[in-house]
Structures are given as structure tokens and as C-alpha cells.
Image (tube, rainbow, N blue to C red):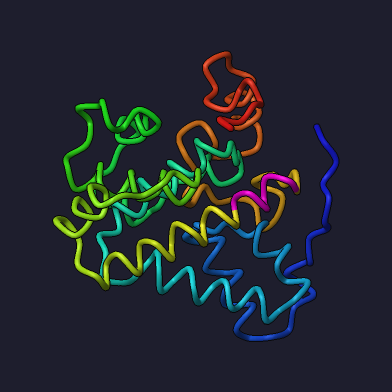
Amino acid sequence: MAEQRISYVDPASVDDPAMIAEFKRCAKFGTPRPESQAIRAHRPPIMMAFATAWKDSFHEGVCDHNIKELCRIYVSRSVKCEYCGNQRSEKSRNAGMVEADYLDLLNFEKSNQYDERQKAALAYTEAITWDVETDDALWARLHQHFSEPELVELGFFIALTMGQQRWLRTLNIQHHALLAGTSASMAPGFEDAAVARESMGDKNYWAGDKTTSE
């Protein structure tokens, strides 16, 4: 296993009430899980700024959460961020999303899995993630399905999650390293460290070839 590049801040060493509450939230609900926030905790203002931005743009907000969850996993599958790609939103899971909803994301335009609103959001995600040139046709699709406040929120969220995932994938961090004992927000087959190792060794593991889509 590759060496971890930045150490974790031990949650037990933290005495700031807001940071303690955030670590507890991460352990209980995930997305993000504790490990990524324990990296950001080296700079407490950054940890809490991310927590606020993520809450406002992902967990809450005006745009449909399930659409944002699809966009989040599209980014994971595109840039091969295993840490992020092996998480699932508990809010989306409780709303009925299942693993089949994620399987055809990189082929979304040709897939029958997604409706036109979801495909428009994923095209927006594709454009932001891969610098695809936008045109009037794309923006017409977007304005057909989303209000301007929704487009602002979705665009900000996509950019935030893309940047964070491109960064986190360089750090070689693993799940269940901190505040272990909960499977909150973990994808099936990643509920604990042992089963995660088995899943990552499976020949059908989504990131198994360790290459990117670039």
C-alpha cells in the first residue's frame, strides 16, 4: 500500500467544540468521513470552511440532493478518487438510491438509467471536470431543467468536489483509519477495513486498473 503523504490530526487532541462536533458528525453520517477532515484539521479554519461549504452546497441547498450525489460519484469515477468513490450519501440512500444508479455514470448520455434532467446535470459535471467546451445547446439544456440558483449551487459543488477529489487522491488515505467502528456512508463492500481490502482486490473493482480517464 502506498505511503500516506500527510498525517492525520488525532481527533482526541482537538479541543475546539466546533471541530469536535464536526468529527462526530463525520463518524456518524460520513460524506465526508473522518480521515479527510483529519487532514484538513492541520489548518482548523480550512477544515471548518470546508465543512460549511460542503453542508451548504451538498447536504443542504436548493438543488436536488440525489442529482448532486450522482455528480459527485461521476467525478470520483472520472478522476479515480478511491477514497471519495467508495462513499455513498446516507441522505440519498435513505431516499431510495441504490448501487445500480451509479453503474453507468461514465456512459450517461447513452444510458437509459438517467432521465433528461440528470443527464443535463452530468453533462455540466463533465464540462467542469474535463474542460469540455460549453455551447448554447448545453446551456439551453441546463436552463430547461434548472433555475439559476440551482445552476450556481450545482456548479460550485461540482468544482468543489472535483478539486477536493483531485487533491485527496494524491494523499493515499484510507477509510476506517480514524474513529473506526461505523459504516456510515460507506458503499457496499466497504463497511469495514477487512471487507474493503477484499473488495479492492476483486477483479471487477471499479478503480482496479489504477489508471485515470485522462
| Image quadrant containing the C terminus | top right
Q: Residue at x 73, y 62 (%)?
A: 39
Residue 97: image quadrant is: top left
Where is residue 189? Give x, y as percent: 51, 31
Secondary structure, magenta segment, majority class: helix
Residue pushed farthest top? 203
Residue 126: image quadrant is: top left
| Image quadrant containing the N terminus | top right
Residue pushed farthest left? 144
Q: Which residue is more in the foreground, 122 or 95?
A: 122
Q: Residue at x 43, y 66 (%)?
A: 156
Residue 169: image quadrant is: top right
Where is residue 100? Give x, y as percent: 31, 30
Q: Residue at x 52, y 62 (%)?
A: 160
Q: Which residue is more in the foreground, 16 or 156?
A: 156
Left/right of residue 7 with respect to residue 153 in the rendered view: right
Q: Residue at x 40, y 52 (%)?
A: 89
Q: How many marks?
A: 0
Q: Is residue 74 above or below residue 204?
A: below
Left/right of residue 135 with respect to residue 78 in the rendered view: left
Give the magenta part as a residue range: 165-170
Left/right of residue 141 with respect to residue 8 in the rendered view: left
Q: Which residue is more in the foreground, 10 or 78?
A: 78
Where is residue 193? Give x, y as percent: 65, 37
Residue 186 colored in magenta in the image: no
